[in-house]
Image: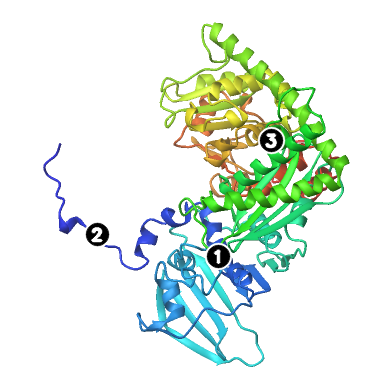
């Protein structure tokens, strides 16, 4: 070990104020990519939502400016502007410049809050090149500005508050030196704001986009709350009964709301929230819901002798097939696992949720025996399919054990056994697969060709899915199982890269693969392990130089600016199979040059609905989606 390095008091760095946030932004917002960028908006909006939960805010407006800014305005009480005794500065300035400064720690200002850690708006300030705030309260309108987290001058009183309502307006410009992109996506913000409107009935949230020639605006307001949320999720699904089953309860100042509806579909759609936070990893509220649901359905089935076909109790997974449900709890002191807040840990919530669901669902079944019986019989069919799938899985394992190798024959595996370094390319067709096998770096890149279009898993149960050879090959190659038994810790590759052609068929195959991953290997998407190649559409040559273009516009720009309008060759790549191995390596597989798009599940409810629209049985919603989004397509090969 080297003796040259020193480690003493002189090597200890103290990051003052918001400097720590700028030094390590991912610690506070998760990442500096598009996901982290949009998280800035959520942090500011969450403060407005907390005002609404406290009963002081009805209207929230989010505006994407044409100058790269985002403005969040509400009609709440306004951030306090009086002097903070400890800091001898306006409270407004303290909240925006001091970590863990806020009114959400004593349960007096806010009984319920999602911004539990108190770092929200100060982190936004730290990661913005400029932030401007305007507050209306205490008889006046006050303003303050900040650059890179530091105050610019002092807070000013602009005018008296004459007839205006109180409220807060924050405008910020994300720091382009910190974020990989500063381009806000309307659809991403729309999904989250719509979700917040569902979860907080009566709150009106408007999203405006001023970047185009015409202003785009959408308003979300749902008096029915999570009942309307379930209706929205089920727009493309065939419901088994009229109306949404809804019940609520409260104990120890903890509010529980549950809305649910059974459908004829095979895929379930269950989403749990705590204080408006999407707890994607579940937690005690989801456990309580599942436990009560399984018990009530089995009790009803046994009392009415409906389980003779399977001669055993139904499992939770059988009952949840095709069920759409939203569970929302509001807790005065929620305990989340980490700053990402994706799992609720409060032990008392399980019992409160369980008793609320047990009481409400038992009553509903007594009053609606026809629906209860239909739900049970669908679950019985699911149980039969589960047993068949188990046999198919065991048979697959036995066959693998007898083979000379347990990996698929068409898989060209890589040499490294470290998942951190290993990449799996799932390539469309034998031609592209063959080129990829020759082009790859065998040390860390594996290639699995798939033939044709894989099974649409949205329309089939697991027993039928496991009969598909292409899917079995993927399951075996990835090595972590499937469905409820999927273990993300056992995956053999930390990069799973979908490599399909840049045409309609390629897009369809990519969607089929993503549907499979989302429905049966979701932790892959949640962990950020799934990518899609973005190979160039054109290769342009001029005077010994080679240029790649992703779009027609890029091609035209290169031809004009680099080739003086006279290129020696323009090559159009329709598919990966048309590239020779060297071209495939240069454009698509070489980590130094390639462009990969990471596929994540930021909003599970929106993703769930999207897969149902694109891959489900209902034709009209899919047709409408295509019509609505066709103008966004940069290129379509007809």
Reading the image, the residue beneath label 2 is 13
**Residue at image point 50% right, 23% down:** 446
Residue sitting farthest toward the left: 3
The residue identified by callout 3 is 511
- Sequence-wise first label, 2 or 1: 2
Residue placed at 85% from the left, 41% from the top?
Answer: 371
Q: Nearer the viewer, residue 223 or 515?
A: 223
Mark 2 or mark 3, earlier in chain: 2
Under circle 2, the secondary element is loop
For the C terminus, the quadrant is top right
Q: Which of label 2 and label 3 is nearer to you? A: 2
Query: Which residue is at the front of the view, 340 or 494?
Result: 340
Residue 150 visible in the picture: yes
Label 3: how many residues lie within 10 Å, few (<14), some (14-19) or many (20+)?
some
Q: Dot 1: within a 10 Å radius of its alpha carbon, few (fewer than 14), some, or many (20 or more) residues?
A: many
Q: Residues within 10 Å of mark 2 (few under 14, many from 20)?
A: few
Q: Secondary structure at mark 1?
A: loop
Q: Is residue 458 above or below residue 210?
A: above
> What separation in Å lies between label 2 and label 1 (alpha carbons)?
33 Å
């Amino acid at each position: 070990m080297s003796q040259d390095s020193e480690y003493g008091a002189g090597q200890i760095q103290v990051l003052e104020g918001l400097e720590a946030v700028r030094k390590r932004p991912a610690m506070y917002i998760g990442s500096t990519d598009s996901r982290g960028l949009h998280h800035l908006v959520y942090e500011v909006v969450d403060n407005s939502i907390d005002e609404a939960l406290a009963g002081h805010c009805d209207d929230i407006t989010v505006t994407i400016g044409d100058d790269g800014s985002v403005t969040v305005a509400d009609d709440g009480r306004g951030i306090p502007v009086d002097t903070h005794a400890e800091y001898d500065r306006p409270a407004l300035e303290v909240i925006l410049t001091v970590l863990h400064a806020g009114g959400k720690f004593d349960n007096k200002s806010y009984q319920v809050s999602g911004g539990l850690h108190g770092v929200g708006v100060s982190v936004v300030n730290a990661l913005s090149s400029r932030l401007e705030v305007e507050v209306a309260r205490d008889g006046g309108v006050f303003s303050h500005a900040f650059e890179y987290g530091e105050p610019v001058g002092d807070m000013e009183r602009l005018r008296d508050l004459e007839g205006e309502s109180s409220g807060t307006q924050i405008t910020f410009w994300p720091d382009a030196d910190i974020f990989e992109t500063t381009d806000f996506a309307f659809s991403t913000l729309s999904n989250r704001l719509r979700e917040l409107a569902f979860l907080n009935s009566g709150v009106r949230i408007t999203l405006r986009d001023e970047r185009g020639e015409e202003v785009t605006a959408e308003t979300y307001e749902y008096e029915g709350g999570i009942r309307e949320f379930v209706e929205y999720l089920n727009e493309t699904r065939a419901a088994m009964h009229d109306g949404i089953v809804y019940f609520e309860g409260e104990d120890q100042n903890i509010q529980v709301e549950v809305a649910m509806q059974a459908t004829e579909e095979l895929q379930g759609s269950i989403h749990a929230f705590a204080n408006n936070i999407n707890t994607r990893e579940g937690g005690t509220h989801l456990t309580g819901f599942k436990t009560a649901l399984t018990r009530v359905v089995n009790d009803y089935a046994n009392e009415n002798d409906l389980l003779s076909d399977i001669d055993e109790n139904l499992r939770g997974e059988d009952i949840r097939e095709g069920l759409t449900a939203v569970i929302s709890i509001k807790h005065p002191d929620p305990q989340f696992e980490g700053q990402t807040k994706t799992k609720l840990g409060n032990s008392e919530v399980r019992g409160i949720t369980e008793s609320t669901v047990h009481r409400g669902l038992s009553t509903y079944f007594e009053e609606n025996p026809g629906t209860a019986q239909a739900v049970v019989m669908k679950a019985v069919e699911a149980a039969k399919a589960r047993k068949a799938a188990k046999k198919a899985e065991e048979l697959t394992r036995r066959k693998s054990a007898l083979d000379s190798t347990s990996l698929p024959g068409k898989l060209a595996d890589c040499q490294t056994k470290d998942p951190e370094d290993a990449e799996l390319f799932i390539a469309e067709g034998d031609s592209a697969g063959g080129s990829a096998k020759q082009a790859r770096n065998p040390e860390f890149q594996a290639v699995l060709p798939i033939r044709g279009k894989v099974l649409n898993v949205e329309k089939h149960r697991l027993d039928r899915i496991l009969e598909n050879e292409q899917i079995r090959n993927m399951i075996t190659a990835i090595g972590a199982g499937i469905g409820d038994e999927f273990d993300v810790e056992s995956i053999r590759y930390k990069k799973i890269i979908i490599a399909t052609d840049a045409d309609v068929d390629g897009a369809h195959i990519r969607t089929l693969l993503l549907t499979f991953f989302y429905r049966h290997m979701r932790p892959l998407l949640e962990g950020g392990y799934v990518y899609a190649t973005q190979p160039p559409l054109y290769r342009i040559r001029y005077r010994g130089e080679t240029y790649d273009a992703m779009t027609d516009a890029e091609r035209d720009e290169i031809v004009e600016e680099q080739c003086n309008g006279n290129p020696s060759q323009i090559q159009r790549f329709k598919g990966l199979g048309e590239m020779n191995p060297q071209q495939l390596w240069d454009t698509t597989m070489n980590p130094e040059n390639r462009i990969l798009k990471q596929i994540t599940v930021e909003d599970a409810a929106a993703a769930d609905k999207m897969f149902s629209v694109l891959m489900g049985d209902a034709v009209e919603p899919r047709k409408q989606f295509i019509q609505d989004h066709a103008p966004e397509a940069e290129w379509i090969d007809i």
